Image (tube, rainbow, N blue to C red):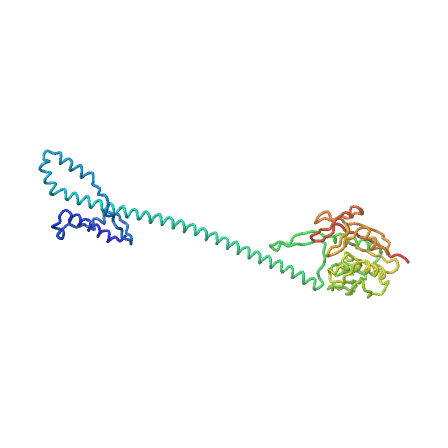
């Protein structure tokens, strides 16, 4: 409410009370409201809206006035004073009562309007607080999304770097199937993810060679050498080694010769080697997993070619997945019957089995029955057992 208009309205009320009791002096009234005094005595909050005073207000008479006049009327001078009061005091009293009532109404309206505004302000403040909470929640959510996005980008960088590194190794002929499988966490930290059958196969080959030959003056053919270090290790031990694979290799040594070819195709003269090694190779041949030509019995054909490449009474050392017979996209898993068919042109001199106890532990055994019931992992195709044989070429 406009403060100046409130004061002006109070003036009008007072003048109206004067005109009501003294019609002749309506325009000559010298009575006025001391606006300064009124301003000091009333704590009134202003507003832009003008408060209309209800014309049907109830006139409230101050109790002190009534008690005063009641005492006078009951006095011994009541008759005389009654006439004097009727002419002089009563109009003044009426004006005072009228003015007080209007002022009360004005103040009541101001207080009521102020209360309504306070309620509206409180509701608005509550809504602002609620909105601020929602903004904070959205901000936290956005920060969480941003953090997750950064973590995902970091994970993608780690994964992409790892994948690109592994792909580069394969293309360069420098990827080797090591017995310890290494995994990587989201932070890039490396950890031991498992152990494969190579933990036994390489040791079996080296031990078998040491038992078969008193010296290293033998010629060795390593079939499927691209992912194995055995040919390089044997060349380092002064064995004369020839390695053959359809994939390239980047390793070289004075005692190592590499031939990029399919073992099923005769590219080497017969009876060239004292010993042939096929370390986890025969089970892959003919399945096309490594880009080789597909054929149902290519593993048997490969063994026939190996037999031709061996010298009389030459030795054949091989390792293959063993257990319940199966064919996966990656390799074959042999059982007793299929392994006998694979080595039918040889005399088996020794057979040992490797058993996977858990993802990290392999043990060696001679118990075929225990190995025969093992199953491969359907998720990564890792075998539950492996057969390791030393064979001798049959005489014809």
Quadrant housing residue 236: bottom right
Q: Position of residue 328 (x, y in %)?
A: 73, 55
**Most extreme residue toward the left, as rendered?**
80
Instruction: Residue at 13%, 48% (x, y): give it.
Output: 22
Q: Position of residue 113 (x, y in %)?
A: 30, 48
> Is 172 situated above or below 321?
below
Instruction: Residue at 26%, 49% (x, y): give it.
Output: 44
Return the residue nearer the eye: 30 or 262: 30
Q: Position of residue 182 (x, y in %)?
A: 67, 54
Q: Is residue 33 left or right of residue 341?
A: left
Instruction: Residue at 20%, 40% (x, y): give it.
Output: 62
Return the residue nearer the eye: 146 or 310: 146
**Most extreme residue toward the front, as rendered?**
56
Image quarter of the C terminus: bottom right
Q: How many marks?
A: 0
Return the residue nearer the eye: 107 or 157: 107
Return the residue nearer the eye: 308 or 176: 308
Q: Is residue 44 left or right of residue 202?
A: left
């Amino acid at each position: 409410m406009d403060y100046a208009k409130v004061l002006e309205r109070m003036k009008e009320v007072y003048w109206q009370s004067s005109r009501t009791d003294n019609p002749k002096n309506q325009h000559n009234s010298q009575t006025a409201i001391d606006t300064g005094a009124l301003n000091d005595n009333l704590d009134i909050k202003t507003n832009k809206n003008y408060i209309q005073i209800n014309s049907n207000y109830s006139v409230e008479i101050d109790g002190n006035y009534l008690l005063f006049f009641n005492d006078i009327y009951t006095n011994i001078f009541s008759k005389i004073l009654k006439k004097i009061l009727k002419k002089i005091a009563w109009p003044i009293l009426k004006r005072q009562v009228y003015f007080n009532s209007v002022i009360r109404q004005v103040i009541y309206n101001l207080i009521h309007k102020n209360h309504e505004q306070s309620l509206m302000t409180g509701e608005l403040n509550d809504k602002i607080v609620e909105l601020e909470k929602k903004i904070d929640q959205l901000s936290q959510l956005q920060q969480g999304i941003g953090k997750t996005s950064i973590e995902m980008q970091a994970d993608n960088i780690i994964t992409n770097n790892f994948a690109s590194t592994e792909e580069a190794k394969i293309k360069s002929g420098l990827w080797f199937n090591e017995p310890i499988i290494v995994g990587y966490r989201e932070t890039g930290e490396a950890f031991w993810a498992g152990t494969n059958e190579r933990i036994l196969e390489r040791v079996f080959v080296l031990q078998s060679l040491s038992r078969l030959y008193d010296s290293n003056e033998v010629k060795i053919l390593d079939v499927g050498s691209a992912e194995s270090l055995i040919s390089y290790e044997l060349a380092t031990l002064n064995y004369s080694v020839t390695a053959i694979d359809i994939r390239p290799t980047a390793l070289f040594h004075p005692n190592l010769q590499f031939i990029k070819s399919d073992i099923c195709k005769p590219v080497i003269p017969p009876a060239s080697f004292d010993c042939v090694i096929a370390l986890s190779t025969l089970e892959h041949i003919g399945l096309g997993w490594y880009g080789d030509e597909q054929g149902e019995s290519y593993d048997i054909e490969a063994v026939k070619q190996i037999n031709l490449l061996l010298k009389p009474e030459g030795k054949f050392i091989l390792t293959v997945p063993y257990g319940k017979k199966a064919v996966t996209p990656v390799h074959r898993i042999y059982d007793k019957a299929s392994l006998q068919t694979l080595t039918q042109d040889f005399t088996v001199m020794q057979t040992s089995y490797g058993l996977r106890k858990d993802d990290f532990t392999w043990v060696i055994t001679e118990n075929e029955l225990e190995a025969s019931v093992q199953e491969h992992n359907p998720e990564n195709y890792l075998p539950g057992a492996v057969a390791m044989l030393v064979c001798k070429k049959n005489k014809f």
